[in-house]
Amino acid sequence: MRIDIVTLFPEVFSSVLEESIVGRARKKGALQICCHQLRSFSPDGKGRVDDTVFGGGKGMLLAAEPFARCIDALCEHLGKRPHILYMSPRGKVLDQAMARRLSKEEGLLILCGHYEGVDERVLEEYKAEEVSIGDYVLTGGELPAMILADAVSRMLPGVLSEELCFTEESHFSGLLEYPQYTKPECWRGRKVPPVLLSGHHEKIRKWHRREALRVTKERRPDLLRGYPLSAEDRKLLEEPEELL
């Protein structure tokens, strides 16, 4: 997959998207991420990309034309139009289902707003899908774009070493992830649950499932409401740990 990002601050992406798992995926060719400086597409040749808001209001608004020039140039270069996203607090909140859906696109083009946002007409013209990372406002779209790029990238083939690296994580299946432990077996008086040391694969599987259900019920009951619990799930929620 190729992810293009249009931003006033392309340099901030390198410290995040060139490191760790995403960075390694880029180096081995499993993923391509390209950042584009919005000012390079300013129509006045001076790099100006914003102006005052019609109807009044504080702050400056990013104009439609620089974004349009960038999008058009990129579409011409690629020979197609990627799926266009705009990071916005009024968009649908990013979740694992959205990340999975977007990971199946051939390419993504993420628009980052700043100041008071962008001229509405560019979003209408290119039918941009608005995406939020939560019910709060940030100074720009760069941090949300990094989060979106990371969430989508790790779903791609060849990015993580195994599919289980993400299929058993929180939210992938609709449940939160079960607790995990490493050495030593006892740390500051806290012991690893004995079932995990038993070597009994079926008991461990049931413990993982029970704990995922328990944690979800305690911390995010909203996720459990409407979740299709199996007969085994209902039984596991009722059983004490020592019976597993």
Image (cartoon, grey):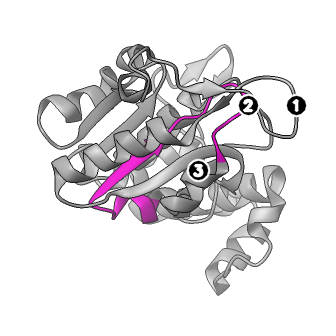
**Residue positioned 68% across, 70% down in the render:** 236
Cβ atoms at labels 1 and 2 below 8 Å apart: yes
N-term mark: 1 or 3: 1
Cβ atoms at labels 2 and 3 below 8 Å apart: no
| Amino acid type assigned to the residue bearing label 2 in the image | Glu
Above or below for 238 versus 79? below
Is label 1 in a helix, a strand or a loop? loop
Report whether residue 182 is seen: yes
The span shown in magenta is 100-119
Q: Position of residue 189 (x, y in %)?
A: 69, 18
Q: CA distance from mark 1 to mark 2?
A: 9 Å
- The local crowd at label 3, few if under 14, some if 14 to 19, many if 20 or more residues have their Cα within 10 Å, is many
**Residue positioned 70% across, 23% down in the render:** 139
Say which quadrant the C terminus sits in.
Answer: bottom right
Q: CA distance from mark 1 to mark 3?
A: 45 Å
Q: CA distance from mark 2 to mark 3?
A: 37 Å
Q: Position of residue 233 (x, y in %)?
A: 66, 75
Q: As drawn, is 128 to the left or to the right of 118?
A: left
Residue 98 included in the magenta stretch of the image: no
Identify residue for label 1. 57
N-term mark: 1 or 2: 1
Cβ atoms at labels 1 and 3 below 8 Å apart: no
